[in-house]
Image (cartoon, grey):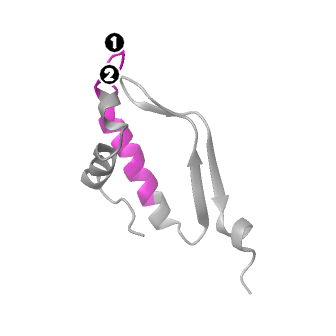
Amino acid sequence: MRSICCPPDADALIEATKLAPLFAGFRGAPPRDRVAFVQLVTSLGEIGRSYSDVIAAIDLNLVAVLPLGVRVLDALIIRRIDVEGPKS
């Protein structure tokens, strides 16, 4: 699987989802900071690529995309050793 390495890749991934129109604002809410969300997705791709030998998964739940910035409200990082066990 190819990691998301740059903002254009992350932006294209977001654009291909049903989430994309919500960044323009929904039910009278102000637009959301898509650039900040793209940066978050890009940074997660970089972390995944850099630490793939020690990280099995990263779970972010809930991510709030605000009019200015993003906030990760809860995060869980699962170590590879916890999933696969120690290497022999």
Q: Residue furthest front?
A: 18
- Write down the quadrant of residue 45 in the picture: bottom left
Q: Residue furthest top?
A: 28
Residue designated by label 1:
28
Q: Magenta stretch containing residue 41, yes or no?
A: yes
Compared across the picture, whether 61 is left or right of 70 comes to: right
Compared across the picture, whether 58 is left or right of 47 comes to: right
Compared across the picture, whether 20 is left or right of 51 comes to: left
The three-letter code of the residue at mark 2 reads Gly
Query: Could you classify mark 2 by the number of other residues whose Cα lies within 10 Å: few (under 14), some (14-19), or many (20 or more)?
Result: few
* Secondary element type, mark 2: loop
| Total tally of numbered discs in the picture | 2
Q: Answer whether labels 1 and 2 touch (C-beta < 8 Å).
A: yes
Q: Quadrant of the C terminus?
A: bottom right
Identify the residue at horizontal 36%, vertical 59% (top origin). 4
Q: Nearer the viewer, residue 25 or 56?
A: 25
The three-letter code of the residue at mark 1 reads Gly
**Magenta segment range?**
24-46
Q: Residue furthest left?
A: 8
Q: Residue furthest bottom?
A: 88
**14 lies above or below 87:** above
Identify the residue at horizontal 28%, vertical 44% (top origin). 15
Circle on res. 38: none
* Secondary element type, mark 1: loop
- Write down the quadrant of residue 46 in the picture: bottom left
Residue designated by label 2:
25
Question: Where's residue 77, x and y in %?
Answer: 63, 53
Query: Could you classify mark 1 by the number of other residues whose Cα lies within 10 Å: few (under 14), some (14-19), or many (20 or more)?
Result: few
